[in-house]
Structure formats: C-alpha cells, structure tokens
Image (spheres, rainbow, N blue to C red):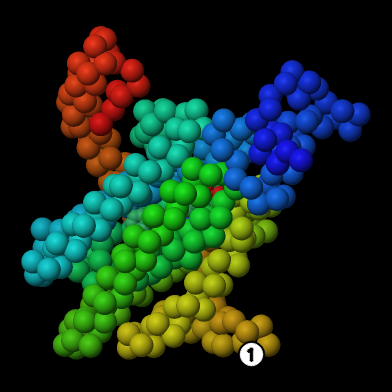
Amino acid sequence: MATAAAQRTAGTEADGTPDTAGTTAHQRAFDAAVAAEERIEPRDWMPDAYRATLVRQIAQHAHSEIIGMQPEANWITRAPSLRRKAILMAKVQDEAGHGLYLYSAAETLGTSRDELLDKLHSGRQKYSSIFNYPTLTWADVGAIGWLVDGAAITNQVPLCRCSYGPYARAMVRICKEESFHQRQGYELLLALGKGTPEQHAMAQDAVNRWWWPSLMMFGPPDDESQHSAQSMEWKIKRHSNDELRQRFVDICVPQAESLGLTLPDPELRWNEERGHYDFGPIDWTEFWEVLKGNGPCNEQRITQRRRAHDEGAWVREAAAAHAAKHTGGAGGTGATRA
Ligand code: BYC
C-alpha cells in the first residue's frame, strides 16, 4: 500500500476534486501524513493556510535570530577576557548561522529572503519581544545565555518534531548550538554569582531584569493565543505556550538555587498537588506594548538592522556578480544575495 507521502505527491488532476464531504484527495493525503507523523516536504501538496503559518513562524524565528545578535554584540568589545570575548563572538556568529538556516527553510515554501527582510524592515513581520530589552551590564550576557537561550531551547526542542521537514531538520542543529549557549550563560553567571559581592549583585540585577521578559518569550497565555490550536493540530507546535512556560519555570528554579541567585517572584513556590512551581502574574500589558513597538529598544534594533542591511548592499552585489560570472549569464540564477 502506498504511504501517505506517496499519495500526496501523486498529483493527478482528480486529486483536487472535492468528494461529497468537500475534502480533496490532496487534503486527505496531507491529513493522513500529519496523523502518521510523516514529514511534509517542500514539493508535497499542503493547505495554503499551513504554508502561510509556517512562513509566518519561521520568518519570525529567523528575524529573532539576527536581531538577537545585537544585544549581545554590544558587549563583544568589552568582554572581560580574551576567553570570554572568543566565546561571545562564536555565539553571536552562531545566531547569524541560525538565521541563515531558517531563511533557507522559509525559502523552501516559495518565499524569498529579500521579501522576508523587507517585511522585517517595514514592521510587517515580528521578531521576539525579548530582544527589545537593553543589555546594561556584562552580567546581562550571562542572563541572556541562561534564561533567553534556556527559554529558546525549551520552546525549540519540540520543534525538532515539527511536521514540516526543512524546519524540523534546521531545528536539530540549532538546538545543539543553543544548548552550548545556555551552558556558557550559566557558567558565566556562576562565576559572577560566586565572585565578589559587587559581581554577585550585578548577576542578581541582570536576572531580576531578564526573568519576566524571558517568560513572555513563550507567547500570550493559551486563552489569548490565536494560532496555537490550529498549529498544534497541524503538529507545527507540539505544546501550548503555557505548557512550555511552566516547563521552563520548573527547570529554572533549582538552577537559580545552584547559582546562588533568586528569581524575582515572591509568589514562586512548589505546588505539591500540581507537581509544578506556581508563579506570579505576568504583566501582559508590557508584552503587548513591546509587540506594538513600544519596548525600550524597538526603535534602536530596527534602525540598526536597516543600517546593517544597507551597508551590506555591496556584498550582495559582489555575490550576484560572482554568481553571474560562474553561470555565464548576466545576473546569474537565484544567487542574488550574500
Ligand atoms: N515576541 O498565537 P500566538 C532565540 C505573537 S530567538 C513577539 O501564541 P504562535 C535567540 C505571534 O507571532 C527565539 N511576538 O502565536 C536568538 C502572534 O502574532 P502574529 C525566537 C510574539 O506563533 C538570539 C501573536 O503574538 N523563537 O532563540 O502560535 C540569541 C499571538 O501569539 C511572541 C521562536 O521564534 C513573542 N515572544 O506562538 C538568543 C520560536 N509571542 O504572528 C536566543 C518559534 C507571540 O499573528 N516560534 N507573539 O502577528 C514559536 O514557537 C511561536 O511562534 C511562538 C508564538 C511560541 C513564539
């Protein structure tokens, strides 16, 4: 018997004809593949809304990676030792690489990187709220690694099982690198936490400022999450925003204890009945304001991104000229960007 994958690529004219229930053979094959935990691949038929949801989420994810380079890059020139500088540079370069895998994954859905960057620069596509907060001290580099990369891993490990093949495969490598990032942040905070009283205070201050925005990374509460139900049905998302947020809190509490730091939430306590930590209310007004562009660094981040893009125009032109030379035609084929 043909697998669901073979059926959905079969591509006869009749596949697009609805049956009496109004469902096409294409749709049935897609539904069967998702139910059977098979991967949907770029050339397979997929519902338009599934494609649009993936482009939205993958683009937002890619944008977050490249905008996320900015707050940390702010500290490269001021890293306190050669070792710390080398680690931070490698981490920031990794984020650029993650952006590239993700833009490539989005391209397999028929959208170009130029188009996605245009949407980012004109504010028509989002990036993660977390990167609109400033990095005020060196300890913020540790807090980003521990909390922001920690939240990212919690959110992204289930995406390795996403139903769309190219996104799921990109996430496998990204998660391995994020795991290194999280450890470097933890190790940095450990050194500060066990250092002088001033260093300990600096680490505590950074954790106080990054804790709540990190919880917001998981998105709005489930009852306000407009896309979750459909994305979970399509197996793009595997868990709801609140489930992942709770998982993250449960992981962080014992880690904070080992670091000798406290999490800035007086309501944080173990709930024996639920088998989870209870935590205090999140300021969702702040979250929505940041999404609307009113966070502390929104303007700075997007201005810097546009400037970097403009200043890189010559690189894209040189790459296009190089590609044209090798394909023998004016303008080349497809390789129009760096
Ligand atoms: N920030 O229906 P919902 C990183 C939007 S980078 C901004 O729950 P969904 C790293 C949401 O897009 C980490 N916007 O949406 C890099 C939607 O608006 P639209 C980035 C947010 O998609 C460098 C609306 O709110 N990770 O790790 O089902 C250095 C309603 O939300 C946010 C990813 O992108 C937010 N926090 O779920 C260090 C992971 N939350 O699009 C680290 C992939 C929600 O209708 N993405 N919105 O205009 C996801 O897993 C999901 O897209 C989300 C949201 C869980 C984020």
Residue 328 vs 300, above or below: the answer is: above
Residue under the image location 26 percent in, 16 percent down: 327
Q: From this viewpoint, which residue is outermost toward the top?
A: 330
Q: Residues within 10 Å of mark 1 (few under 14, many from 20)?
A: few
Residue under the image location 60 percent in, 45 percent down: 39
Where disc 1 sits, the SS reads: loop
The answer, for residue 126, to whether it is visible in the render is no
Kind of residue indicated by mark 1? Glu
Q: Is mark 1 within 8 Å of ligand 1?
A: no
Q: For residue 15, what is the image quadrant? A: top right
- Where residue 182 appears, as percent x and y from the top left, is 34, 68
Residue 32 vs 26, above or below: the answer is: below
- The residue labelled by disc 1 is 272
Closest to the observer, 16 or 128 = 16
The answer, for residue 19, to whether it is visible in the render is yes
The N terminus - image quarter: top right
The C terminus - image quarter: top left
Q: For residue 195, what is the image quadrant? A: bottom left
